[in-house]
Amino acid sequence: MAHTRDKYADFENLRERAVTLRREGLSRRQIRDRLRVDNNDILNRLLEGEPPPEWTKRPNAKDDLRDKARELRLQGWTYDRIQAELGCSKSSISLWVRDLPKPERRDPTEQAKLAARKRWEHELAFRDEERQRTKAAATSEIGTLTARDLFMVGVALYWAEGSKDKPYNRRENVLFVNSDPGVIQVYLAWLDLLEVDRERLRYRVMIHLTADIDGAERYWADLVGVDPSQLQRTTIKKHNPKTVRKNVGENYRGCFVISVLQGAELYRRIEGWWSGIVGSAGRDHVPPLLR
């Protein structure tokens, strides 16, 4: 210990020499070897305030992370929060921010809540990535629809969402209502497959009074490729103040109604097709879809 104290006794003289070498363009390692300073803390003090020469500033893939870590540290973030945010090691963070003042200690309860929230946000992001991967894989399994594929989809879609005839109320109307634009597009493609002339179709919007009615009419008309003036009179649904509606906001466009003029014969065929699907699905020979 006595030798170490003697070695660095004349600190100011040693610092003057270190600064001179630094300004001459020497690196930390070169200065350390030249002055025989083997203590990093002492070397940091000797070079305090002296920027490194340009030639030592090599491009580093972690430069952006370092800058972000310093920014977060100045905002009072702990090592744990910075690590969770940036995904880098605590040792790197410590190296990058060691010259910055330590943040004030937070209340342990608040700090725990922040850490828990960050972990939960990370978990949600991971789950969303998994969700998107599953959807993308499922999308690729569909491939190109054949005419029969679309035919079967359309029959099932109509029977799920379209109007049905009742023994006590014989109407036999082909009328389809839905709020999903994708469903509307598939339904129209199915009608085209059945060679139902678009001139036989009538369109109407059903929407709550408090929504953007004009915007909804323009949206649906554009989706099906007609002028808004060609839509039938919009059906306005009055809002029940006792009901908490969740279908609100700028993306709420109500439901779209498509009816087929002179559709009794088509309706009978749809009902027959559906009966055929139900009967066939009940048999034992239906093969598995995916292996």
Image (tube, rainbow, N blue to C red):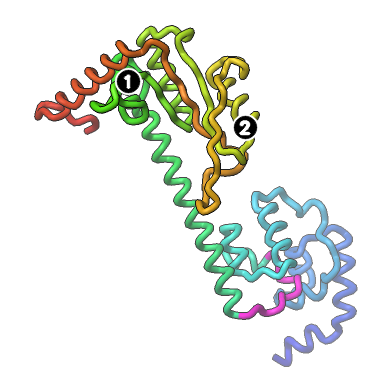
Front disc: 1 or 2 = 1
Q: Give x and y (percent) for residue 140.
A: 38, 29
Q: How many numbered markers are drawn?
A: 2
Q: Give x and y (percent) for residue 34.
A: 78, 68
**Front residue (pair 151, 144):** 151
Please state which amino acid type lies under the numbered disc 1: Arg
**CA–CA distance between discs 1 and 2?**
30 Å
User: Hey, which quadrant is residue 36 in on the image?
Assistant: bottom right
- Dot 1: few (<14), some (14–19), or many (≥20) neighbours within 10 Å? some
Left or right of residue 280, residue 252 in this image: right
Above or below — where is 5 with respect to 153? below
Above or below — where is 220 with respect to 24? above
Left or right of residue 177, residue 141 in this image: left
SS majority, magenta: loop
**Front residue (pair 120, 96):** 120
- Residue 171's disc is 1
The verdict on residue 38 being magenta is: no
Q: Give x and y (percent) for residue 44.
A: 77, 73
What residue is at 34 percent from the left and 24 percent from the top?
A: 158
User: Hey, which quadrant is residue 221 in on the image?
Assistant: top right
Residue for badge 2: 213
Q: Give the secondary structure at mark 1.
A: loop
Q: Quadrant of the N terminus?
A: bottom right
Q: Residue most toward the bottom?
A: 2
Please state which amino acid type lies under the numbered disc 2: Ile
What residue is at 40 percent from the left and 9 percent from the top?
A: 196
Q: Give x and y (percent) for residue 214.
A: 65, 29
Please give the range of residues in magenta.
96-107
